[in-house]
């Protein structure tokens, strides 16, 4: 039995709290400050990078040696332990949401059903925890956005499940790392590979967006942030985020080698690493808040901040926190923080259910903002209390029951369960792949002239919520024309951000184009602004 590291449990609560505050910000704190909106949104990106990197560290630290030494015995036990850890609470909350949400009640009452974000087709993939493994446009949104509020947080469960299945395959490779320089090079290599993937996405983003437009429709092409294919690739898809998990595994190997050599890094060195990590993350937050929000294209920073730009600094903090002599290790090992960290998974799953029971009102003055901050604090406290009750009252007993039943079963029954589970899971993956291919319609642009992808008014003031709000007006005015001058009118488009000089951003495609065209103009007060759209070369 390996010695537990309390600080790693403490930082789990920090990550869950960051995600919860990020989601709470979009509900309680939407107002007149674009900087506040973006900074709160970045908290969620930070929390997910912590989860994925920490997961690699914990899995390698706890299971790496046993799987490398006796895989036939250890792998089934590892997978059962992971299922017992994440599945019971997830499936219960998901089924509650499914039965009480806007799918069943409209059917019972005979009222119209929500037109976006709810489809029965995705239920088996959600229950099989593979909804992030493929991309599709279902009921107007991608699978990761189905079944609010559980669906939009359980995407990380799906991504982590992919990590768990990959780990037994790559575990023997980590067992070959026997020196500290090799472990450090492994960590650098994981960062380099993910950064290389980001660069590849940057170089081919026009092709990706155009493919998404043809294959899945305008909902999947930028600048529609929510459902875009490019966001799925760099943020949701496990095939890209797995390198953060690998980074955590490399950090665990480094920690194991230090323990084996009875080497204790100097406290000054560990604190310096943690400070560098904190400063690097602070720079990511600052730069994100002070740069213009991305429009029809993304910079390398826009792409990397969704994954490795935050995971790399997190890695420095983790390796320092794993040593109890460091300042980070001592702070994160506080008893109250470790206690809350035990319930972090329950907090992560349940917080949106609690938050959405509160009324949502935008703020415009400083006093209103303070009131909304108090409401967010109250909702977060309530969510934390519910999470603690769920963890100790349901999670822990369910985990013990599942693991106990598996251990008590005969070897023959265990083998049958493993084989049946494997066959069923492979069948589910094949079904998901078939469904995803069917969803890719490959409809080429047949309309002559301008085909509008998206129009956004005030995206520079309302980073996410404004995206695509002027698409209908732009398509009605310019669709099908070779050239079009669109007059930006607040009377026609509404005012999504009072008091802010709003930018109008248009994205369109023409028949035979190999990239999505875009243009923008600022709506100056007292001056009629207009934007020229054209399909002429």
Image (cartoon, grey):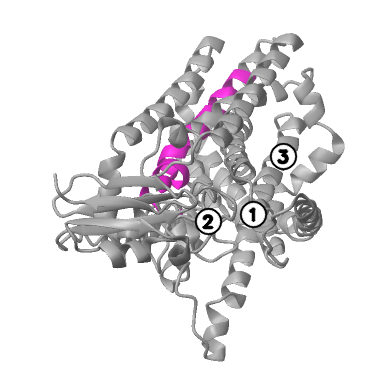
Q: Nearer the viewer, residue 359 or 406?
A: 359
Alpha-carbon distance for marks 1 and 3? Answer: 22 Å
Q: Which mark is residue 255?
A: none
Residue at figure coordinates x 39%, y 44% from the top left: 233
Q: Secondary structure at mark 1?
A: loop
Alpha-carbon distance for marks 2 and 1? Answer: 9 Å
Span shown in magenta = 226-255
Could one spot residue 169 in this view of the protein?
A: yes
User: How many numbered marks, from 0 up?
Assistant: 3
Magenta-highlighted stretch: main secondary structure?
Answer: helix
Q: Which mark is residue 30?
A: 1
Does 233 appear in magenta?
yes
Say whether disc 1 or disc 3 marks the residue closer to the N-terminus: 3
Q: Which mark is residue 14?
A: 3
The quadrant in which the N terminus is found is top right
Specify few, some or many for label 3: CA neighbours under 10 Å numbering under 14, 14-19, or 20 or more: many
Could one spot residue 403 in this view of the protein?
A: no
Q: Secondary structure at mark 3?
A: helix
The residue to which callout 2 is attached is 465
């Amino acid at each position: 039995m390996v010695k537990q590291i309390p600080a790693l449990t403490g930082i789990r609560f920090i990550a869950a709290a960051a995600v919860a505050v990020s989601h709470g910000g979009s509900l309680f704190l939407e107002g007149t400050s674009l900087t506040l909106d973006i900074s709160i949104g970045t908290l969620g990106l930070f929390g997910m990078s912590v989860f994925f990197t920490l997961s690699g560290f914990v899995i390698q630290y706890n299971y790496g040696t046993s799987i490398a030494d006796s895989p036939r015995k250890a792998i089934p036990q590892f997978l059962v332990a992971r299922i017992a850890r994440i599945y019971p609470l997830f499936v219960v909350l998901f089924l509650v949401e499914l039965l009480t949400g806007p799918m069943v009640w409209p059917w019972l009452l005979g009222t119209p059903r929500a037109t976006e974000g709810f489809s029965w087709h995705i239920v088996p993939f959600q229950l099989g925890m593979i909804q992030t493994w493929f991309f599709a446009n279902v009921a107007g949104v991608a699978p990761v956005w189905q079944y609010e509020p559980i669906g939009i947080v359980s995407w990380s469960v799906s991504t982590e499940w992919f990590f768990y299945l990959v780990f037994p395959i790559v575990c023997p490779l980590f067992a070959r790392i026997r020196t500290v320089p090799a472990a450090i090079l492994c960590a650098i290599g994981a960062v380099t590979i993910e950064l290389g993937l980001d660069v590849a996405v940057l170089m081919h983003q026009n092709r990706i967006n155009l493919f998404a437009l043809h294959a899945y429709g305008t909902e999947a092409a930028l600048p529609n942030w929510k459902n875009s294919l490019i966001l799925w690739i760099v943020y949701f898809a496990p095939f890209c985020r797995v390198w953060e998990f690998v980074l955590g595994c490399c950090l665990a190997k480094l920690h194991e080698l230090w323990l084996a050599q009875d080497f204790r890094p100097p406290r000054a060195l560990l604190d310096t690493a943690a400070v560098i990590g904190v400063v690097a993350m602070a720079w990511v937050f600052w730069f994100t808040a002070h740069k213009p929000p991305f429009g029809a294209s993304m910079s390398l920073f826009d792409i990397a901040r969704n994954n490795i730009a935050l995971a790399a600094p997190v890695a420095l903090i983790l390796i320092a926190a794993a040593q109890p002599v460091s300042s980070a290790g001592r702070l994160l090992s506080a008893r109250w923080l470790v206690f809350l960290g035990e319930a972090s998974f329950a907090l992560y799953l349940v917080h949106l259910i609690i938050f959405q029971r509160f009324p949502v009102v935008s703020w415009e003055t400083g006093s209103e903002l303070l009131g909304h901050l108090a409401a967010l604090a109250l909702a977060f406290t309530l969510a934390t209390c519910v999470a603690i009750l769920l963890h100790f009252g349901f999670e822990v007993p369910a985990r013990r029951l599942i693991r106990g039943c598996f251990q008590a079963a005969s070897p023959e029954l265990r083998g049958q369960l493993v084989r049946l589970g494997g066959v069923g899971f492979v069948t589910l993956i094949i079904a998901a792949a078939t469904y995803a291919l069917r969803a890719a319609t490959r409809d080429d642009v047949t309309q002559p002239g301008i085909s509008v992808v998206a129009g956004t008014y005030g995206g520079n003031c309302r980073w996410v919520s404004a995206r695509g709000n002027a698409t209908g007006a732009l398509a009605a005015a310019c669709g099908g024309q070779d050239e079009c001058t669109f007059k930006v009118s607040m009377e026609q488009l509404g005012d999504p951000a009072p008091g802010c000089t709003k930018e109008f951003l248009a994205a369109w495609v023409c028949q035979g184009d190999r990239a999505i065209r875009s243009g923008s103009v600022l709506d100056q007060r007292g001056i009629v602004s207009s934007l020229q759209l054209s399909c002429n070369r």
